[in-house]
Image: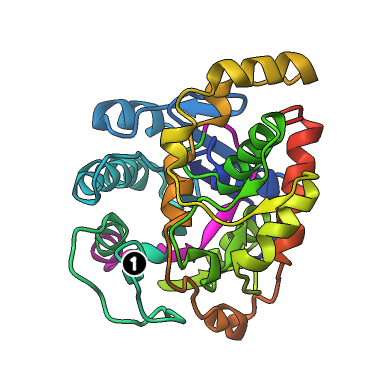
Amino acid sequence: MNEERKVALVAGANGVIGKNLIEYLETQSGWRVIGLSRRGGPGQIAVDLLDADDTRAKLSGLDDVTHVFYAAYVDKPTWAELVAPNLAMLTNLVDAIEPAASGLRHISLMQGYKVYGAHLGPFKTPAREDDAGHMPPEFNVDQQSFLERRQEGKAWTWSAIRPSVVGGTALGNPMNLALAIAVYASISKELGLPLRFPGKPGAYDSLLEMTDAGLLAKATVWAADSENEAYNIANGDLFRWNDLWPRIARYFELEVAPPLPMSLDAVMADKEELWTSIAAKYGLEVPYSAVSSSWKFADFVFGWDYDMFADGSKARRAGFHEYIETPGMFFRLFDEFRKAKVIP
């Protein structure tokens, strides 16, 4: 990036990805950061991106924005239901900011391996950015198609960033695997139980990768100099739960018992009272509602009884060479949860 003054507009500022992206940008010289979220917060604009009028009213004065980093997401029960609201939020943001910010230079779109059909079942691995598409519905694909059409003839460019499962510390997020594991382990320990892998048969032995939120932030900003490119971004190593799970158990001073398929969303539905007692016992500072939002996502990840990884060499060939060791990432995140009194 050159040293010219840059103004970043980060949509999804309270999520695992957006939170870390803002923290990273704030350490970089030459950047001013504006966060967007539904709830708002310090240094943020509270905006409902599903409401075109509200979005236009809140963003029309942001005439100095140079970069949009889009990491907003709204969850829905089915893949088909995800399309309309997630496409509408991106469309409303671009409709509002493009006429206001005459110096707009880049729009960064956060995606994921759903572009490759990873959520549907066994897919080609390693997945590559130029792999063939798959049968819709898939909102990530629709969002990229929208940007491609909208960018034609414009001065600004776009990038599409494709991480694997993202590891970070944001609370109340629907897709925080590390937090789900930490809370599951803490409850298992309080009940005197071993740590059982709760996924499908076969998932324990599949080959996976993850993406550290801090690493992802660096890659996202790096890619903001790209001209209409997509990049897979992951930690750079692969793992199997059959090797990592016992190490996670040792971190929490737990024994390991054989895997037992179960839905965490189901078995954790009645644990609020138990968590309240754990919180009182250990002086924790967050309620169960803040740590229990990712059970469905954890079930989804632990249901991958097939390999889940992509080819990250395109980003390396283009100049991004950062990497993170995945076990170390988990242990660092668990340490941060403890330090913040999220878990015992």
Q: What crowding class fits label 1: few (fewer than 14 Cα within 10 Å), some (14-19), or many (20 or more)?
A: many
- Start and end of the magenta stretch? 147-172
- Where does residue 291 sit, x and y in percent of width and height? 57, 30
Which residue is at the front of the view, 314 or 97?
A: 314
In the image, residue 155 lies in the stretch drawn in magenta: yes
Give SS at disc 1: helix
- Res. 239 image quadrant: bottom right
- Where does residue 188 sit, x and y in percent of width and height? 65, 36
Q: Is residue 125 above or below residue 335?
A: below
- Res. 147 image quadrant: bottom left
**Does the image show residue 27?**
no
**Does the image show residue 15?**
yes
**Residue for badge 1:** 115
Which residue is at the front of the view, 213 or 200?
A: 200
- Tally the numbered discs: 1
Image quarter (top left, top right, bottom left or bottom right) of the C terminus: top right
Colouring of the image: rainbow
- Where does residue 141 sit, x and y in percent of width and height? 28, 63
Which residue is at the front of the view, 308 or 151?
A: 308
Q: Is residue 66 above or below residue 76?
A: below
Image quarter (top left, top right, bottom left or bottom right) of the N terminus: bottom right
In the image, residue 170 lies in the stretch drawn in magenta: yes
- Where does residue 226 sit, x and y in percent of width and height? 50, 72
Left/right of residue 118 with respect to residue 150 in the rendered view: right
Question: What residue lies at 28% left-to-right and 66% top-to-bottom?
Answer: 148
The residue most toward the bottom is 317
Question: What residue lies at 19% left-to-right and 58% top-to-bottom?
Answer: 137
Which residue is at the front of the view, 291 or 80?
A: 291
Question: What residue lies at 36% left-to-right and 82% top-to-bottom?
Answer: 130
Question: What residue lies at 25% left-to-right and 58% top-to-bottom?
Answer: 138
Give the residue type that dot 1 points to. Answer: Val
